[in-house]
Image (cartoon, coloured by chain):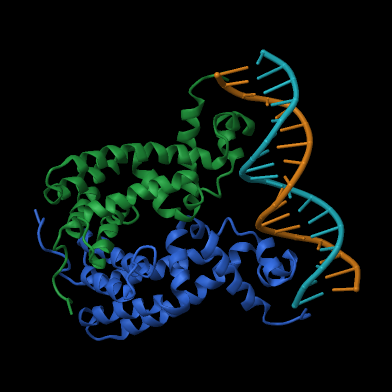
Chain colours: A blue, B green, C orange, D cyan
Amino acid sequence: MAGRRSDTRERIQRVALDLFAEQGYQKTSLREIAEKLDVTKAALYYHFKTKEDIISSLVEDLAASLDQVLEWARAQQDPVAARREFVCRIAALMEGNFTRLWLFIHENQPTLKEMHVSNAFEERMKAVFELICGGERDPAAQLKARLAVVALVLGNKPQVLAAADRSEVALRVALELASPHGGRAEAAT
Amino acid sequence: MAGRRSDTRERIQRVALDLFAEQGYQKTSLREIAEKLDVTKAALYYHFKTKEDIISSLVEDLAASLDQVLEWARAQQDPVAARREFVCRIAALMEGNFTRLWLFIHENQPTLKEMHVSNAFEERMKAVFELICGGERDPAAQLKARLAVVALVLGNKPQVLAAADRSEVALRVALELASPHGGRAEAAT
DNA sequence: GTCTATACTAAGATAGAC
DNA sequence: GTCTATCTTAGTATAGAC
């Protein structure tokens, strides 16, 4: 088959995310990834120092995209007015190639926790939560900000939302949770 | 040290959950558990057939408790009226010994997915979601039902909610998400 | 019934040849 | 840039002591 090639790194990333999303990070062995690419385990180690490095590289890509949205949000004059659009941009980041990665991150937090890139990503997510709840100190608002992101992640999962327009439904729910008076209908003691 | 004893099974469960919650399921080796209990790996295999069996047994305990709440809910004449109390009872299940287990289940779904007990537990959770959203077919309501449970799980996590009264805050948010008109303030297109 | 000693397979990881 | 060979440790399994 094709001898030495130079796109192996990208191919590893793609195949690895396929397998990780499909059968879990731990259940996926490097041998499996290597076989699917028709190379040996050792070849993987040329491109990535460790197994965790493979997924680290993916998370880094997402973090870079997150930074762009974060940068945009910080440049807005009126943060409160921009909140809604901010949530929409986060939602847009969940569609396309990043969908499975978001879900993977959400469902494998303990795995990521031990990784170098984890702290950097967690920092960004904290910034996201802060922006969504507009820096409110109300604990309920902070919790809702996190739930807004969870809504977007879960909403994009077919097993959770069967509807074809699930991403729109998810966005609607996320926006409700993010709005200053979001879901304050009753039970206010 | 103490020779043959008969509470080893419970001690394994306790220590294992300690370590799993602390450093993740995969990062925790049986050798580690065994050393902490001052026995050999093989001793663990007398009490549990596999590593997964250890956590399966814990999930089964929780499932049994869930069944009680589910049974109570189904016995109610007016399911709609009982919804609020139902959520409170689920919340009560998250305090005490089960707190870490809930969080573990929430954060290690891919790990659990491959386990025998997983299906049984998932079934129960589906029933819980159904009861919370009152069988509504509105996708948004179904998503919110799931988010209500997530609110309870995340709300009990100190890293998420620093407030001392976090379980109350979490319950309040969960009740909002579970209420029929929960969080329907705007953005209804 | 409870546990230890021992061994097997497969995984992640490394060194060095080509 | 990739392979072969090798190492360490993990999960697993069994035989047998007490």
Q: Classify B101 as above or below D2.
A: above
The residue located at (42%, 54%) in the rendering is: B107
**Residue B4 visible somewhere in the drawing:** no
Q: Is residue A86 left or right of residue C10?
A: left
**Residue A80 visible somewhere in the drawing:** yes
Q: Which quarter of the figure is the N terminus of chain A placed in? A: bottom right
Q: Is residue A6 left or right of residue A175?
A: right
| Residue A29 position in % (x across, y down) | 64, 59
Q: Quadrant of residue A136?
A: bottom left
| Residue A24 position in % (x across, y down) | 53, 59
Q: Classify A72 as above or below A178.
A: below
Q: Is residue A127 left or right of residue A133?
A: right
Count of labels in the image: 0
Q: Classify A70 as above or below A18.
A: below
| Residue D5 position in % (x across, y down) | 86, 57
Q: In this orientation, which residue lies closer to the viewer: B160 or B106?
A: B106
The residue located at (25%, 70%) in the rendering is: A173
Q: In this orientation, which residue lies closer to the viewer: A138 or B71?
A: B71
| Residue B12 position in % (x across, y down) | 50, 32
The residue located at (33%, 50%) in the rendering is: B125
Q: Is residue B163 left or right of residue B42?
A: left
